[in-house]
Amino acid sequence: MDSDDLHQRMWKPDLGAVDRSISRGLQDSKKPRNARSKRALEKKEPKLIENPKTCLFLRGTTASEIVQLAIIDLHSLKKPNAVKFTKKNPIHPFEDATSLEFFSQKNDASLMVFGSHSKKRPHNLTFIRMFGHHVLDMIELFLDPTTFRTLAQFKNNKCAVGQKPLLLFAGSVFEDTTASGGPYVLLKSFFIDFFRGELNNYVDVEGLQYMVSITVGEPSDEEPQPKAHLRVYLIKTHRSGQRLPRVEIEEMGPRMDFRIGRVKEAEEAVMKEALKKAKQLEVGFLCLRFELARKEVVLIHLTPQPKTKKNLETDIVGDKMGRIHVGKQDLGKLQTRKMKGLKRGRDAEAEQDEDITMVDGDSDSEPKRPKQSS
């Protein structure tokens, strides 16, 4: 027997147990040891306005060349809020997500794209969302290798890093909430989170450089789950001789066609907790206005009127005065401040006790009858 074979038989580490122990230890050690770790933990704390979602790209033990090229292109579109791993990871997301939760906590990533390839699930991209560094929901997308095109295969200009795209979802299945259209509604939610970026109230028209189009055909008996077609276009504006410019689009890449595989939906209670908003961020509705003079799209958040508080008044000076309604109080049980001057002395208490006993003795004794004369 060869020494290498003997070593492989004797030493077989449980990577899942190691990852679980590391993640458990990381969760327990919440107290910072120095100022640097304290600042790092403060960045990961919940905020009123959250940071842009970071996406972590990683591959499995077997990943085809098409999957790796797709991960590279998606990583370039997601920059700068993206982290890419190059090493192989023996992970199966739908079976054991412990390692993914550890990577999410270590890199502060709430989105993940996991690439793998097998005979049963070829050219597989698994999109994963996290909530509290735990898996919220997942969806599998199988790429079509015949129609796949990369960014480098389109010889034209590319969009700048960090630009927010326009999102176009074409297809009635994106609005279908039944069982047949549920995966497409989830797919739409995934891509909105993926391309959202940082939330801004003002968007300059010149900054709208590219558009992401996701199109799905109508389902039929032959194809109950049609393919989704992802296309990315550059937006170009030209002079038209009028007030509005002439807009043209040119395909920039990548080009991806995929069909939906397995889906893991979030639990209802966890999703309700994830969608909860702070009271300071509750808004009435969102108004979109296009200003021609300033050439920018303005997103106006209209907040609802604050609720009027009862029994509150403001006097002439500006002081706020309130009226409080309380129930009837028993003043006999009111706790007052004890003072020595108000306490009874021992002599007074003794005299009072003697008077009480004398009165009781007189009341108990019967009056003597006068003697009758014979």
Image (cartoon, rainbow, N blue to C red):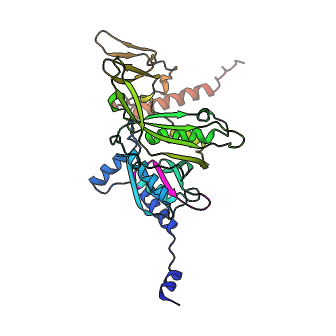
The stretch drawn in magenta includes residue 214: no
Q: Is residue 196 above or below residue 293?
A: below
Residue 289 falls in image quadrant: top left
| Quadrant assignment, res 338 | top left
Residue closest to the eye, 185 or 253: 253
Measuring 57% from the left and 62% from the top, which residue is drawn there? 118
Q: Position of residue 278 (x, y in %)?
A: 45, 33
Q: From this viewpoint, is residue 268 visible? A: no
**Residue 117 inside the magenta-drawn segment:** yes
Residue 29, placed above or below residue 363: below
Pick the quarter of the image with the C terminus: top right
The residue at the point 41 percent across, 29 percent down is: 280
From this view, report whether residue 310 is shown above or below residue 20. Answer: above
Q: Which residues are magenta?
A: 106-121
The residue lying toward the viewer, choosing from 218 and 294, is 218
Q: Position of residue 313 (x, y in %)?
A: 39, 13
Residue 239 drawn at (x, y percent): 33, 23
From this viewpoint, which residue is outermost toward the bottom?
A: 1
Residue 363 shown left or right of residue 326 in the figure: right
| Residue ID at (55%, 26%) | 359
Which residue is outermost to the top?
A: 316
Q: Image height check: is 21 above or below 56?
A: below
Measured from the top left, where is residue 53 in percent x and y? 41, 43
